[in-house]
Every structure is written in structure tokens, then in C-alpha cells.
Amino acid sequence: NAAAARAEAAQGRAEVAALEAELWAAEVEAKAHAVKRDVMEGLKSKLTVTAESQRMTSSEKEKLRSDLRAELSIMNAQFAQLEGQQQKHVAREESLRNQIKVLEGELWGAPRDAWPSYKAVIEQSKAELNEVRAQLKDTKNAALALRRDISQKSSKLPALEKVADAGSLVREQMERQLVERMEEIAVHEVRMAGTEAALVQLRGQLEVARAVLFSAEASEGVHRKQAAAIHAELGEIITQAREVQDMGKQTWPADVAVAKKPRTWSLWR
């Protein structure tokens, strides 16, 4: 009936309005998610570039530290080798001095014909002693120069250590932040997927509700047309009745017309 059609149409309109409001809110949320995702992607891109730059800088600093450590290790090994040579030269020098002292002592007690042999050995030992002393001097000078270089380079190591450690710490922090941003984006993508799925579902529900509303409004329109037709028909009947009443007034006696007048007007008007 007409009342049922009107009620169904009103319920359909309310349902469509509610779904449209829910869909609008979901679309706003989806747009907000999209904006947030773009912002997060932008931050991730900047952080990636910064992290890569920091990684390169940190690698360079770590390489400088590693190279300096390796160089110092080699220099310390060379210094240890020079110290070993120096000790050998000192021992050889002492041995030659003692040898010369012994030979010179034996020379005075040896036969005169043995003196040339002793003198030759003594001269040879002295020449070797001079050579050993020269080698010892060179070794000492080389060791002193190398020690100065080691000291100078070692003084630079703490600063490089500090800079390299700080760079490594910053790099690790940035890498952690980058991982966190990527995890946040992954979680956000899941939420966006859920929102998109909800949008699809809401759009489908809205289409169904609009179809139901269209059918209800069509039914309501039919009842309205029927009601309008009935109303028009009743109006026509009333008009015809009035015309008949007016014609009766002209043919009834005056006293009858007067007597009937109040009752007739109360009936039709």
C-alpha cells in the first residue's frame, strides 16, 4: 500500500544517506592515509640519501683509521727490527773491542816475527769495528727518525678513532631510523589496503542501497499517481454533484428549497 511504500522509501533514503556519510568519511581517511604515505616516502627518500652519504663518509673515515693503524703496525715492526739490529751492532762492537784488546795484549808478548800477523789481524778488527760503529750509528739514526714518525702518526690516531667511532654511531642510528621508517611504511600500506577494501565494500553497499531506494521510490511514485488519480476522480464526482444540486434548486418549490437549503449545504460543503 501507499503507507508501506512511503515507509520503505524513507528507510531507503536514510540508509543511502548513512552509507554516503560513511563512504565520505572513509574516502577522507583514505586521502589522509595517502598524504601520510607520501610524506613518509619523502622522509624515507631523504633519510636514504642522508644515510648513504653518511655511510660513504663513515667508510672514508674508517678507511683512514684502518690505513693509519696498518701503517703504524708496519712502522712498529720496522722499529722493532731496527732495535734488533742495533742490539746486534752493540754486541758486535763490544766483541770487536775485546778482540782488539786481547790481540794487542798478546802482541807485546809474542815473538817479533809474529808481530806482522798480529798487527794485520788487529788492523782488520779495527776496520771491522769502524764499520760496525758506522752501521750502529746509521741504525740509531734510522730508529730515532722512525720513532719520531711513529709518534707523530700515533698522535693523529685518537682523533681519527673518535671521528670514525662518531661516524659509525651516526651511521648506525640513521640505518636504524631507515629500517623503522620502512617498517612504518609497511604497516601503513597494510592499513591503506584495509581502507581501500572497506571503500570497495561501502561502494558496493551504496550501489545496492541506491538500487533498492530507486525501486522503493518508483513504487512510492506509482502510489502517488494512483492517489492523485483517485483524488481527481473524487473531485470530479463532487463537482458533478454540485452541478446536480444547483439544477435541483431551480426546479424545487421555494418553500422546499428553503427548507432543504441548510441540510443540502451541510452535506456538500
Image (cartoon, rainbow, N blue to C red):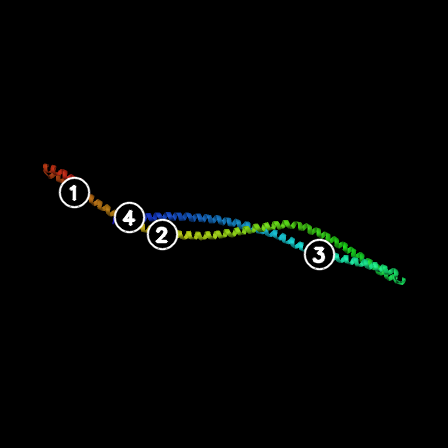
Mark 2 or mark 3: name the one nearer the start of the chain.
3
**Three-letter amino acid code at the position of disc 4:** Ala
| Disc 4 + disc 3, Cβ < 8 Å | no
| Disc 4 + disc 1, Cβ < 8 Å | no
- Total marks placed: 4
Of the residues tagged 1 and 2, which is closer to the observer? 2
**Three-letter amino acid code at the position of disc 1:** Ala
Q: Which residue is mark 4?
A: 7
Q: Which residue is mark 2?
A: 205
The answer to whether residue 53 shows anywhere in this view is no
How far apart are the two marked residues, 2 and 3, measured between alpha carbons? 86 Å
Mark 4 or mark 3: name the one nearer the start of the chain.
4
**Three-letter amino acid code at the position of disc 2:** Gln
Element under disc 1? helix
In the rendered image, residue 100, in percent from the top left (x then y), is placed at 83, 59
At horizontal 67% and vertical 54% (from top left) the residue drawn is 72
Of the residues tagged 3 and 1, which is closer to the observer? 3
Mark 1 or mark 2: name the one nearer the start of the chain.
2
In the rendered image, residue 170, in percent from the top left (x then y), is placed at 56, 50
Element under disc 2? helix
Of the residues tagged 2 and 3, which is closer to the observer? 3
Q: Which residue is mark 1?
A: 241
How far apart are the two marked residues, 4 and 1, measured between alpha carbons? 36 Å
Mark 4 closeness class: few <14, some 14–19, many ≥20 residues within 10 Å: few
Front one among 252 and 55: 55
Work out whether 233 lies above or below 130.
above
Mark 3 or mark 1: name the one nearer the start of the chain.
3
Q: Is residue 160 left or right of residue 188?
A: right
| Disc 2 + disc 4, Cβ < 8 Å | no
Mark 2 or mark 4: name the one nearer the start of the chain.
4
Mark 2 closeness class: few <14, some 14–19, many ≥20 residues within 10 Å: some
The answer to whether residue 80 shows anywhere in this view is yes
